[in-house]
Structure formats: structure tokens, C-alpha cells
Image: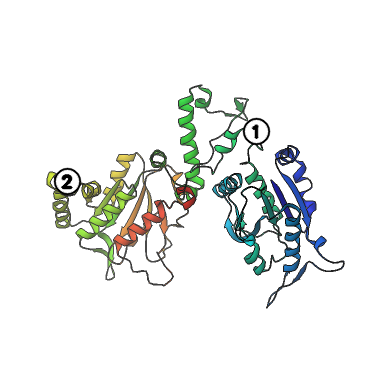
């Protein structure tokens, strides 16, 4: 495999290519690295860059210089698959690296500037183009780039560090570069969970001991512990990674078992109704029915329909009795699965008591409101791990009417802000709000590259 790196500063690679596994890969002739300096593509005293067009400061690399450098590389090693690096590029992650490596090994890379040529019977040639200054003329990327990668949501001084990150990540998947294949296969981000914690002797260091289970010698128990621990850590720090992964049924169960129980309360008392802070609203079968189904979809333990009005609780119970009866189960068993989670209850205090008795801990209360209040710490939909690490049950509280009154809001631990799209309209029905919030909090959203595996 031939790898050309086009850069302003080849010096940045001198130590890199003489170190560790990269050096060994070159020594073992697994790869051949070719460093090309942009300034060598210019006539003496010519600049490699030019001012950006339009308002603003900064310099961009000249298209003709980049074109000449790419042409120089392809004259040496033949047509190359050209990779550019930019903050606006596709996010480079473990799955992307593996996918690219598989394409290289199977010689399935397509080079668009050579009439969609594939590397069928030829050596693979990869060209890394490393920008500097304000970057590269947009037309160059448009014409040449077969891939554009970003290594994160930040801006660096140039594309050389991203190129080195790419090389380290990509080459680990090339056979014989890394000694043991298992070391690569079980890396963090190779699946939905991080790698499990690693320990080495001594057994105790700085007063901290290796977990007893790791010392037990019971391989099955150790493996179960490793999976559970990796899952917990990933849920805590990178739930976004878990939710975009393709999860097996066993992995879903592992996640569920490591997430604290969640509950939903829909308040028909202690709500604001036409300015009355202690108002009541009527229960509707549609709310009960749809919120139960949303809650069942996302694994909520119970749905509390809270009203101090006895006749309203009686109406709810009559509705529930049908769906919980043999006739209701036979009529629609999936409806039964959802509705059996619903509990009509008199007060918010009784909701908290129920959860405490069931889970052995006071619930963390998360209120929702179409308005902003200063009663609780605001959180967003990326804060699950911070809440879950408290290892207490979580209660989402929703208001009817014009929202929750101050009595309930003052008991909040956290507040989720209003739901908005691009317009400023945010008058969702409560059943829609519950569905949106539960999906933002729990919903899985597998990326195509996971589903392709």
C-alpha cells in the first residue's frame, strides 16, 4: 500500500513515521509512505497560498499548487484515493475507520477523478491532502476529494494532526500492523460499548484494589462483569454513542438493566387553570391511552394519572378495568401491555411514596414546562448520564391545563426546557410532549453503518 501525504510541513511526520507500529509497518513493507511538500510544487519565490476572495482575512492554498502535488503523487504511484481533512467533513469514528480499511483490503475504493476507477488489480494508493491557513479552495475539494474527514468539532491550525490520527486509526485494521487481532476487535467504539476496564499487577496500588471478580478466575463471571461495567461506563459518558449503535436484544437488555427505573406522572391536579394555581383538569382516555403506549415503548415502569377528584379516578379505573380484563386482553394484547402500567392516584406525594417503596430510594424529579422557571437546575437531552449516575429512580412530571403549579415545580431536581422546532410555536398536546421527550431521552437511532454490519 502506497500512502502519499501532501503537506506544508513534512517535518511534522519525521518522528511520527519512525516511531512504534507505524515504523514497523514501513520496515515490514506493509506500507510505503511518501511525503510531498507543497512549496516544492512552486517556482522559486512563488507562494503556495493566495488571499481569500470576498470580505474577511485569511489565505487559502492555491488550486494549481494542490493539483500539481496530486499529479506528482499519481505520476509516482498511479491514481490515488484522495482524502482531505476539514472541520466540515464527515465525522471520523471507529466504524468509519473500519469501513474504510475493509474497502482498502477488498480493493473496493473508487477514485472519482479517474473515471470512477477501482483498484482491482493494482496496488492501493491513498493520498492525504493536509490543508493549512484558512484551508483549501472549495473547488479543489469538489473536484478531487473522494472523502473529506473531520476528527472533531473544533478547528486546528492544519490538517496534519488529523492525517496522523487517521493513519493511526486506519492502519490498526491492516493485518500484521497490530500484533493481536483481538486487541483491535474489542476496542472502544468497535461495538456499542466502551472497552472494559483493564488492570495489571500489583493487586493494590495507592490504596485501590483490583476488583475481586477480576481476581476470581471464573471466566464466565469476569466476562459478565466486563460487559456490565463497559455498558455502565458508556451509558454514563457516551449515551449518544449507544443510542446510535445497532444493539442486539441482549445488549438492549444489558442497557435496560443498567439504567435506573423511570416513571411518568401526568398531573390533573396541582396545575394552572386560567390563572388558578391549584386547579384541576379532566382526565381524557386519549391522553391515558397514548401516554401509556409511549411509556411502554421506552421502558417506563409506571404511568401515574394524578387527580384529587375521586370521580375522575373512578372514570379512569373503569376504563382500565376493561383493558385489564380477559376480554380486553383478547381484544388487543399489546394495548393491555401498555395500559397495565397506568396507576390512577390521588396526589403527587403518594406518587413519590409509591416509587420510594418500590425502588428503595427517593426519585429524582424532572419537571417539564413550556416556560422557563428558576426552581431547578436546567438540563438538556445530553444529560442522561449525569442523572443516571445518581443511581436513583427518575420521575418525569408533566402538567395539563396551563402547566404545573409552583408547588410541584419547587420540588424539581431538574427542569427540561420547552420543546421547539424552527418556528416559535410550542403548544403541543401533553401526549405529544411526552412522546417527544421520552424519545429524546431514551430513543435509539441506529446509523446506517451499524445496520450494515
Structural crowding at the residue carrying mark 2, measured as other residues with C-alpha within 10 Å and reported as few (<14), some (14–19) or many (≥20): some
- The answer to which of 61 and 265 lies nearer the viewer is 61
Residue at position x 53%, y 42% in the image: 190
Asked which quadrant contains residue 325, the reply is top left
Q: Could you tell me which secondary element the residue under label 2 belongs to?
A: helix
User: Mark 2 and mark 1: span between their CA atoms?
Assistant: 58 Å
Side of 216 where 328 appears, left or right: left
Q: Give the total of numbered labels.
A: 2
Residue extending farthest right: 44
Structural crowding at the residue carrying mark 1, measured as other residues with C-alpha within 10 Å and reported as few (<14), some (14–19) or many (≥20): few
Q: Give the mark, 2 or 1, whose residue is nearer the N terminus.
A: 1
- The answer to which of 202 and 180 lies nearer the viewer is 180
In what quadrant of the picture does the N terminus appear?
top right
Residue at position x 33%, y 69% in the image: 427
Whole-percent x, y for residue 370 in the image: 37, 65
Q: Nearer the viewer, mark 2 or mark 1?
A: 1
Asked which quadrant contains residue 44, the reply is bottom right
Residue at position x 60%, y 46% in the image: 101
Whole-percent x, y for residue 38 in the image: 78, 61
- The answer to which of 132 and 57 lies nearer the viewer is 132
Residue 410 shows in the view: no
Residue extending farthest bottom: 54
Residue 329, disc? 2
Residue extending farthest top: 217
Residue 17 shows in the view: yes
The residue wearing badge 1 is: 179
Amino acid at each position: 500500500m502506497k500512502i502519499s501525504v501532501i503537506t506544508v510541513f513534512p517535518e511534522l511526520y519525521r518522528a511520527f513515521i519512525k516511531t512504534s507500529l507505524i515504523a514497523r509497518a514501513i520496515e515490514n513493507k506493509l506500507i510505503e509512505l511518501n511525503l510531498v511538500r507543497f512549496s516544492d510544487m512552486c517556482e522559486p519565490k512563488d507562494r503556495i497560498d493566495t488571499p481569500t476572495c470576498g470580505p474577511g482575512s485569511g489565505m487559502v492554498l492555491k488550486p494549481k499548487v494542490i493539483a500539481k502535488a496530486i499529479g506528482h503523487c499519481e505520476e509516482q504511484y498511479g491514481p490515488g484515493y484522495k482524502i482531505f481533512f476539514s472541520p466540515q467533513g464527515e465525522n471520523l469514528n471507529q466504524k468509519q475507520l473500519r469501513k474504510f480499511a475493509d474497502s482498502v483490503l477488498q480493493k473496493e475504493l473508487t477514485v472519482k477523478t479517474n473515471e470512477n476507477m477501482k483498484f482491482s488489480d493494482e496496488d492501493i494508493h491513498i493520498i492525504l491532502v493536509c490543508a493549512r491557513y484558512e484551508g483549501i479552495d472549495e473547488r479543489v475539494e469538489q473536484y478531487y476529494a473522494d472523502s473529506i474527514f473531520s476528527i472533531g468539532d473544533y478547528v486546528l491550525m492544519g490538517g496534519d494532526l488529523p492525517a496522523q490520527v487517521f493513519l493511526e486509526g486506519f492502519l490498526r485494521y491492516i493485518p500484521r500492523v497490530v500484533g493481536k487481532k483481538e486487541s483491535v476487535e474489542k476496542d472502544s467504539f468497535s461495538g456499542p460499548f466502551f472497552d472494559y476496564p483493564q488492570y495489571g499487577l500489583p493487586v493494590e496500588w495507592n490504596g485501590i484494589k483490583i476488583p475481586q471478580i477480576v481476581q476470581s478466575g471464573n471466566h464466565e463471571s469476569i466476562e459478565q462483569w466486563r460487559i456490565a461495567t463497559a455498558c455502565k461506563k458508556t451509558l454514563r459518558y457516551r449515551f449518544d454513542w449507544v443510542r446510535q449503535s445497532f444493539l442486539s436484544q441482549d445488549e438492549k437488555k444489558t442497557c435496560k438493566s443498567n439504567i435506573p427505573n423511570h416513571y411518568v406522572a401526568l398531573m390533573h391536579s396541582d396545575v394552572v387553570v386560567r390563572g388558578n394555581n391549584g386547579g384541576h383538569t379532566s382526565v381524557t382516555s386519549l391522553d391515558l391511552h397514548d401516554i401509556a403506549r409511549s411509556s411502554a415503548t421506552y421502558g417506563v415502569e409506571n404511568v401515574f394519572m394524578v387527580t384529587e377528584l375521586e370521580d375522575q379516578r373512578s372514570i379512569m379505573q373503569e376504563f382500565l378495568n376493561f383493558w385489564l380484563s380477559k376480554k380486553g386482553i383478547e381484544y388487543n394484547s399489546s394495548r393491555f401491555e401498555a395500559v397495565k402500567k397506568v396507576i390512577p392516584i390521588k396526589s403527587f406525594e403518594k406518587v413519590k411514596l409509591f416509587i420510594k417503596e418500590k425502588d428503595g430510594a427517593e426519585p429524582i424529579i424532572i419537571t417539564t414546562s413550556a416556560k422557563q422557571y428558576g426552581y431547578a437546575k436546567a438540563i438538556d437531552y445530553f444529560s442522561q448520564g449525569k442523572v443516571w449516575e445518581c443511581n436513583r429512580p427518575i420521575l418525569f412530571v408533566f402538567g395539563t391545563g396551563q402547566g404545573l403549579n409552583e408547588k410541584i415545580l419547587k420540588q424539581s431536581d431538574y427542569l427540561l426546557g420547552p420543546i421547539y422546532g424552527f418556528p416559535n410555536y410550542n403548544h403541543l398536546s401533553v401526549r405529544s410532549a411526552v412522546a417527544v421527550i421520552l424519545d429524546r431521552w431514551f430513543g435509539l437511532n441506529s446509523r446506517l453503518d451499524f445496520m450494515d454490519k
